[in-house]
Image (cartoon, grey):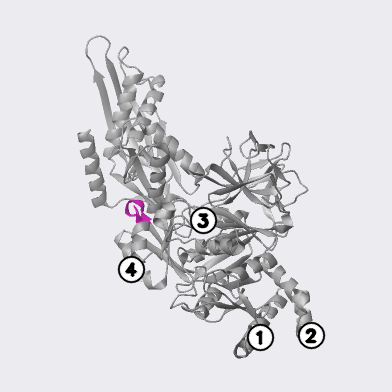
Amino acid sequence: MKEYETSEIRNIVLLGHASAGKTSLVEAMLYSSGATSRLGRIDDGTTMSDYNNDEIERKFSISSSLLHCEWKKHKINILDTPGYLDFINEGKAAARVADMGLIVVHGQNGVEVGTELVFKFVEEENLPVGFVINLLDKENADYEKILEVIQSSFSNKAVPLHLPVNVGLDFDTVIDLVSKKMLSYPKNGKGDPKVAEIPADLADKVESMREAIIESVAESDDALLEKFFEEGSLTEEEFLNGLKKAIVARTIFPVFTTSAYTNVGVSSVLDNMITYAPSPLESRQVKAILDGKETDYMLDSSKPTSLFIFNTTSASHVGEISMFKVMSGTLKSGMDLSNTTKKGTERIGQIFALNGKDKAEVAHLQTGDIGVVVKLKHTETMDTLAEPKYNIVFPAIIFPNPVLQTAVIPKARGDEEKISTGLHTLATEDPTIRANYDGEIKQLILSGQGELHLTITLERLKARFNVEVNQIAPKIPYRETIRKKGESKYRHKKQTGGAGQFAEVWMYTEPLPTGSGVEFENTLVGQNVDRVFVPSVEKGVKAACEDGILAGYKVTDVKAVFYDGKMHPVDSKDIAFQIAGKGAFRESFLSADPVLLEPIYDLEVIVPEEYMGDIMGDISVRRGKIQGMDSEGSFQKIIAKVPLAELYRYGTALRSMTQGKGMHRQKFSHYEQTPRDIQEKVVAESKEHKEEE
């Protein structure tokens, strides 16, 4: 395969809401450039990008794919990312290593909740970004309306560089406003347009729109703005150079128009990526930790070799691979690199450029290029590899907290270790899922971004590790505490022949402020109890707190005071005072108006305005308390506090209520007292469970 210099490379990430046509746009790019000989279709399962069986079966992207093509002697690396909300966070990792983002917008549906979300990804990465209004060949496509919504949602920095001529079922013509040429595309999908002059009936509109671009370019640079005011225009060279600088500096968000399915407008998008997207050397600075100090880092081919691993995946077609971007130097096969994130060394074997499942071996990759290596031994997603003695680390990507949890139990006995190993491997590949054993509720908890996310994770667990699980609702980690002072004088006496056991503990308990945990204190005076038994009593109290008293949940915010007791010169011993301490605490606790505390979560729900009433009503039914409302782009955000017990599979319910147009975020807030009727139910269920055991 041909090798490219850094200046000849463009790294593009395609982002957007589900069904906007990202994968079809990639397919059209590859076909137009000759990287593939056929225009693959999602419905047929023949696209280069969606090659995994679960993607072909479900007809949407689940994982990010790396692809590339050559256009006008430049290499364009394309990262195709999922738009389905369960998997959309894959775009965060891709945005970190791209140099230009293209947000694909549905020509009928316009800006959706996923569009807002991915725009935040590019903002967080300070990434130059453009918009592609796709699917303009649909009957109800509305270019003017979608452009207006993009500009109102993401500012007037969104500047059209395309004017679609005949939007609708016969859409085949686009005007490039920069070159002032009309591009008419063939009906056969070949993507090679006929170039013509602007028709007279569109000349005024084109001139007006082009003047708006020139004004936006002038406003992006003080020197250009001064000249524009003085002379009323810019030279063609000033305009074109200024346009690229404005796009790279994020003061202009170019807007393009396409029908990816019929390959209309796609060649012009490729042209614009070569002309206006930055090469890796022109791209923005990134954060790095160099010799222990945080610094702003520009990619540089003269520095020692380093790479950032942004994705790890395993598929039957390609095996286990690590996707990386070369951040400095030149990567060559056979190099020994240090893992500066975790320590250790990796030998770089074969290096590949990917087109979906197809691999092409390359001898080396220059700074800024993106590629894959197979079977690294100790390196995981978000690790940095660098030449020995080059002490650089690129920071990890921060992914959102999971929004859905399920407890998993093995279908077959003895599979616990295989399940744990398999889920750990899958979580290493996909940082948006988490798997951990919760010792408090004694369950293995799998957490992810939605129900489908968890379903596919467990399907992959079965396929790769030959193990199956059942899903059950996670237990709620209630807490137990008291509301008033309680007291007990507890005697433990055991005589069964031989040495006996005797201990008497006098104790009182009292509530502590929220978040205080459990405190133990002794105020013994006199010689009724030898001080050697104080640790034994404390151990008994701690055991009672761990086991729970009211319903088997951890005790918190309680102070236990051991103030007196009795002992026997022969029968008193450590175990006797442990048992007496546990019993005294239990009795004292039960006499102190015990209550259950339940975890309360902060909930943010982002939905179109028309669903606000339904969502707020549903939150009330879930015992939630609305804290406020705000706007998030063109959507509304409801802020509430809701008990965790009411949030199981909330994402599924939300999508059902909003026809898939809503999303939510949740995180732990605090504990508060459980209503009495719910407390009684939980306590009764706990007793029933103990009796069954």
Give the secondary structure at mark 4.
Answer: helix
The residues colored magenta run 642-650
> Crowdedness of circle 3 by 10 Å Cα count: few (<14), some, many (20+)?
many
Where does the image place residue 52, in percent across and percent down from the top left?
46, 50
Does residue 647 show up magenta in the picture?
A: yes
Q: Amino acid at mark 3?
A: Ser
Q: Which mark is residue 49?
A: 3
> What residue is disc 2 on?
231
Q: Amino acid at mark 4?
A: Asp
Q: Earlier in the sequence, mark 4 or mark 3?
A: 3
CA distance separating discs 2 and 1:
18 Å
- Tell me the SS state at disc 2: helix
User: Where's residue 301, x and y in %?
Assistant: 75, 50
| Residue 375: x %, y % from top left | 57, 38
Q: Is residue 1 above or below residue 84?
A: above
Position of 478 with respect to 494 (left or right) is: right
Instruction: Tell me the mark number nearer the camera, choosing from 2 and 1.
Output: 1
**Does the magenta portion include 473?**
no
Of badges 2 and 4, the one in the foreground is 2
Between the C-alphas of marks 4 and 1, the distance is 47 Å
The label nearer to you, 4 versus 3, is: 3
Q: Nearer the viewer, residue 50 or 100?
A: 50
For badge 2, the amino acid type reads Glu
Q: Earlier in the sequence, mark 2 or mark 3?
A: 3
Real-space Cα separation, disc 2 to disc 4, in angstroms: 56 Å
Q: Which residue is mark 1?
A: 207
Quickly name the residue at label 4: 614
Furthest residue to the top?
498
* Residue 622 relative to residue 378: left or right: left
